[in-house]
Amino acid sequence: MTAPGGRGSGRRVLSWLLAVVLLGVVVWVVVAPPGADDPAPPPVTTVRGVIGSEKLAFFGDPRVQEVFRANGLDVRVDPAGSRQIATTVKLDGYDFAFPSSSPAADKLLAGHPAARTYAPFSSPMAVATFAPVVDLLTEAGVVVPGSSTFDVRRYLEIAAAGTRWDQLPGNTAFPARKDVLLSTTAPCQSNSAAMYLGITSYVANADTVVADAAATTAVLPAVQPLFRDQGYLPPSTEVLFASDRRSAPMRRRHGEP
């Protein structure tokens, strides 16, 4: 007999520990082999949708596509102006429509009363430009310093005066001989331009919603040039962003922002 605490006792304790460890390994292997709890990937269903073009980058994001596939969906989309989606786009062959505004969605529902609706996210209106242009607009009082807030009233004042970019004091970053105007889409086809029209007309109407023919007539001189003087207005913001990407290198070569 080996006394307690002797070498034999140590071997027995070690043996029991090894047995328990080995038993645990065997039980784990037999009961829960690697990957046994992983669910089988769901079958993938291809769905097609027509979306407001602002959402194109979201649907094209590999991380978003991965989430869709994890849920058994291969989502393919075509971009269009939100008002186009609600009025002229033929929805035959599409599984869903995703415009960028409630009015466009309501118009769609009026023609498709059985459709289900979801509002997964919303986003604010924003002006996209280059940092040197932000600096210029800040100096001109259009962008509020330190907040990136766009002062629509000040912008309307500059637009009403027909101010050109090269007339802004100290402008060496973007001395273009054209009016200081935001580039927009066509308000008859695109929700973003319609919202822009709503904002500018509201400010031009003394911070009051334009609700009748008299108010419409009163604000026309202030808001009509914002669109007319741009020239061609594309139907969706996808065109604007694509144009900026193509022309940015050329502007940089000429020392513009």
Image: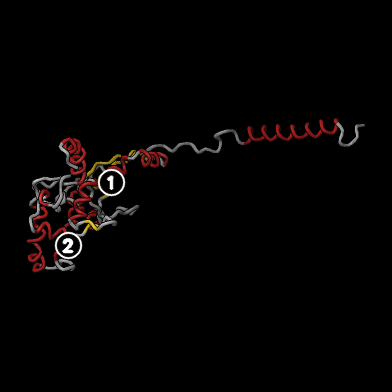
Amino acid under disc 2: Arg
Query: Residue placed farthest to the right in the image?
Result: 1
Q: Secondary structure at mark 2?
A: helix
Residues tagged 2 and 1 counted as in contact (Cβ below 8 A): no
Q: Residue at 23% x, 48% y: name it.
A: 128
- The image shows a total of numbered marks equal to 2
Question: Of callouts 2 and 1, which one flags the residue occurring earlier in the amino acid sequence?
Answer: 1
Quadrant in which residue 71 is drawn = top left
Amino acid under disc 1: Lys
Q: Position of residue 238 (x, y in %)?
A: 21, 43
Q: Is residue 190 visible?
A: yes
Q: Position of residue 51 (x, y in %)?
A: 26, 46
Q: Which residue is mark 2?
A: 153
Q: Which residue is mark 1?
A: 55
Viewer-proximal residue among 72 and 167: 167
Q: Residue at 18% x, 49% y: name it.
A: 84
CA separation, marks 2 and 1?
A: 29 Å
The answer to whether residue 61 is left or right of residue 221 is right
